[in-house]
Image (tube, rainbow, N blue to C red):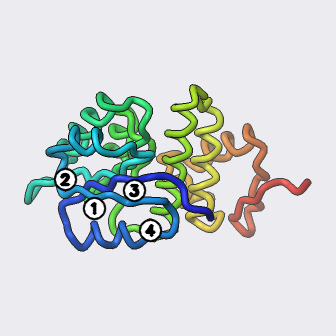
Amino acid sequence: MSPAGCVLVVEDDADVLRAARLALALHVDQVETATSPQGLEDLFVRHTFDAVLLDMNFAAGQRYGREGLDALAQIRAIDEHLAVVLMTAYGGVQLAVEALKCGATDFILKPWRNDNLIAAVTAAVEVTRSRRKGDTLHLEVIERRAIERALAQHAGNVSQAAAALGLTRPALYRRMAKHGFAIAHPADGQAHEPQS
């Protein structure tokens, strides 16, 4: 994968910050870091970012993501086109849904697998570039990409992918059929693209 874009990682844990920087270093042109949402306006004056990877909790003992959602709103006010991927160790489906409703592009849990982090951030870079060109991603495209990613993350296991997307298996099967995915054989539980 060729390097693409400048990414800002906002995370208060130095070890997590270092891990994110190392994971992304070969996949983006530049990784900038910040240890809190304070001073984001100054960073945005000095840099043009293509994506932000944003922690949701910065104060000791916080687990509800309010600080991250507030920072997300601040970032969206600065640059409405910028795609933001939220991350937390204390996430659940409700928090992920709220984050997406507030304008996040994606939501990942810590600890992450590097390939999932890289996929989420590089997809966010694509979204930002598309928005900045004036292109809009249709909901159908976003839904298909989310299904593809969930199936890839769970090695084609439909039950696990459905759970990750917050759907029932039947609901995921309906969406897969709508987007032209092959329906899994009950014996293997795996979903595959139709053969051309």
Looking at the image, do the residues carrying marks 1 and 2 touch, with CB atoms under 8 Å apart?
yes
Asked if residue 163 shows in the view, the reply is no
Going from N to C along the chain, the mark reached first, 3 or 4, is 4
In the displayed orientation, state which residue is furthest to the front: 46
> Would residue 151 be found to the left or right of residue 81 on screen?
right
Disc 3 target residue: 108
Q: Residue 151, relative to residue 80: is it above or below?
A: below
* Badge nearest the viewer, 2 or 4: 4
Mark toward the start of the polypeptide (2 vs 4): 4
The residues tagged by marks 2 and 3 sit, at their Cα atoms, a distance apart of 13 Å
What's the residue at 43%, 52% (across, down)? 6
Horizontal side of 165 relative to 156 (left or right) equals left
Crowding around mark 1 (Cα neighbors within 10 Å: few <14, some 14 to 19, many 20+) is: some
Secondary structure at badge 1 equals: loop
Rounded to the nearest whole Å, what is the CA distance between mark 2 and mark 4?
Answer: 24 Å
Residue farthest toward the right in the current orientation of the protein? 196
The amino acid type, in three-letter code, at marker 2 is Asn
Assign the N terminus to one quadrant of the image.
Answer: bottom right
Crowd rating for badge 4 (residues with CA inside 10 Å; few <14, some 14–19, many 20+): some
Quarter placement of the C terminus: bottom right
Question: What x and y, as percent, mark residue 161?
Answer: 56, 57
Q: 87 and 187: which one is in front?
A: 87
The amino acid sitting under disc 4 is Ala
| 132 shown above or below 107 | above
SS class of the residue under badge 4? Answer: loop
First reached walking from the N terminus: tag 2 or tag 3 = 2
The residue located at (39%, 43%) in the rendering is 48
**Which residue is label 4 attached to?**
25
Q: Quadrant of residue 11?
A: bottom left
Mark nearer the N terminus (1 vs 3): 1
Where in the figure is residue 31, as x and y percent of width and height?
38, 60
